[in-house]
Amino acid sequence: MNSMYFTEEHQLFRESLQDFLKKEVVPHIDKWEKTGTIDRFIWKKFGDMGFFGLAYPEEYGGLNLDLFYTVILLEELQKVNSAGFAAAIWAHIYLAMTHLNKEGDDAIKSKYLSGSISGDLIGCLCITEPFGGSDVAGMRTTAVKDGDTYVLNGSKTFITNGVYSDYLVVAAKTKPEDGNKGISIFVMDRDTPGITSTKLDKLGWRASDTAEIAFDNVVIPASNLMGEEGKGFPYIMQHFALERLIMGINAHARAEYALESALQYMSERTAFGKTINKFQALRHKVADLYADMEICKEFNYSVAYRLNRGEYVVKEATMSKLKSTKMADEVIYQCLQFLGGYGYMEDYPMARLLRDSRLGPIGGGTSEILREIIAKMVIDKKEYKPAT
């Protein structure tokens, strides 16, 4: 335990969470990976344990705990060896629910945030579109004001929880002529007429329901607008810092899990009369990989500490995701090599880890886009500011 960031209470929470995941989640992972459907009962169990409300206000059923409880939840979710299951959980808590908490009014929070914390409702965040992933400002989905309603038309893709969620948090252009100043954020129920979802077949994250979603003349009340009209883009940008840090934390956690699994195997596997963890070439490779993982982990903890204090850490969170996801891919690739032929077998964790990890440098902003963001801040001295 790193006592610089984690208290005894944090450690007790980690142990309790580990026991819960081992008992309630791990026995079902292989089934969920095969079917691509996470059984509904587990959402309610997470809600009953308070895991969905760690960072949220007590008045809506949350626990209002510091960000390091979230760090622990993310780290332990990576160690059930299903990034798809982990993604379904954290996309609900930290993508959809973040917008509800930050931009929703009391009526929206009372219905959607409270229901999300209890595990009775599942949410998804709909930003990415078929014709524009990282180019958020280029989205084409529109929301046209019509009296006391908005009418939505367009499509979204690569949406985690896009099939089985109960509600959707959707970004759409209310004034297309204003570019990124014309984007607004809405919440809507899944069963609203005109919403259809198509499940996507993925390389990894097999347990999660990733979807393309179409909006065909979807009519929602004007009260479903969250925050101010036209402020959607800065809202999205502001929350990207948390999303990118989450993906950085996920990356260091799955790299650590891969190394732990590989070291256990290497301590048992013998060749030429000794266990393979005694061969210098392998030992030194492990040393390099472990050092890379620890450097990313310590950096991520420091960014989490600053974010927990309310600092606007868009540059640091972007760096977190960029470097940690690349590190995780390299660590897991090498750990699979340590296992030799067994690493390629589905009976061992590395094959799934390799597939699941590859999404890291793509989702939540590709590495190419992240490098350009960092370059703008470092070279061009561009300053990103929180939404006001």
Image (cartoon, rainbow, N blue to C red):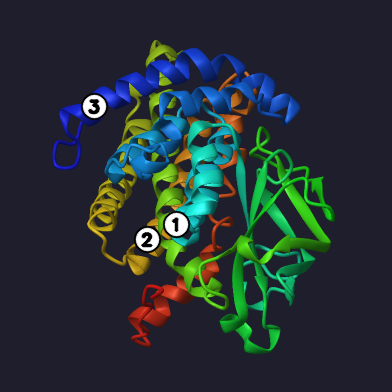
Q: CA distance from mark 1 to mark 2?
A: 6 Å
Q: Which residue is mark 2?
A: 317
Q: Which residue is mark 1?
A: 244
The residue lying at 26 percent from left, 60 percent from top is: 310
Tag 2: amino acid: Ala
Residue 345's x, y, as percent?
A: 64, 23
Residue 90's x, y, as percent?
A: 50, 42
The answer to which of marks 1 and 3 sits earlier in the sequence is 3
The residue lying at 37 percent from left, 57 percent from top is: 320
Residue 6's x, y, as percent?
A: 20, 36
Q: Is residue 278 left or right of residue 223?
A: left
Displayed quadrant of residue 172? bottom right
Tag 1: amino acid: Arg
Q: Nearer the viewer, residue 86 or 162?
A: 162
Q: Secondary structure at mark 2?
A: helix
The answer to which of marks 1 and 2 sits earlier in the sequence is 1
Label 2 crowd (10 A; few <14 / some 14-19 / many >=20): many
Q: Which residue is mark 3?
A: 11
Q: Is residue 383 above or below residue 369?
A: below
Does residue 305 appear anywhere in the picture?
yes
Q: Is residue 223 left or right of residue 287?
A: right
Q: Secondary structure at mark 3?
A: helix
Residue 355's x, y, as percent?
A: 62, 39
Label 1 crowd (10 A; few <14 / some 14-19 / many >=20): many
The residue lying at 20 percent from left, 31 percent from top is: 1
Tag 3: amino acid: Gln
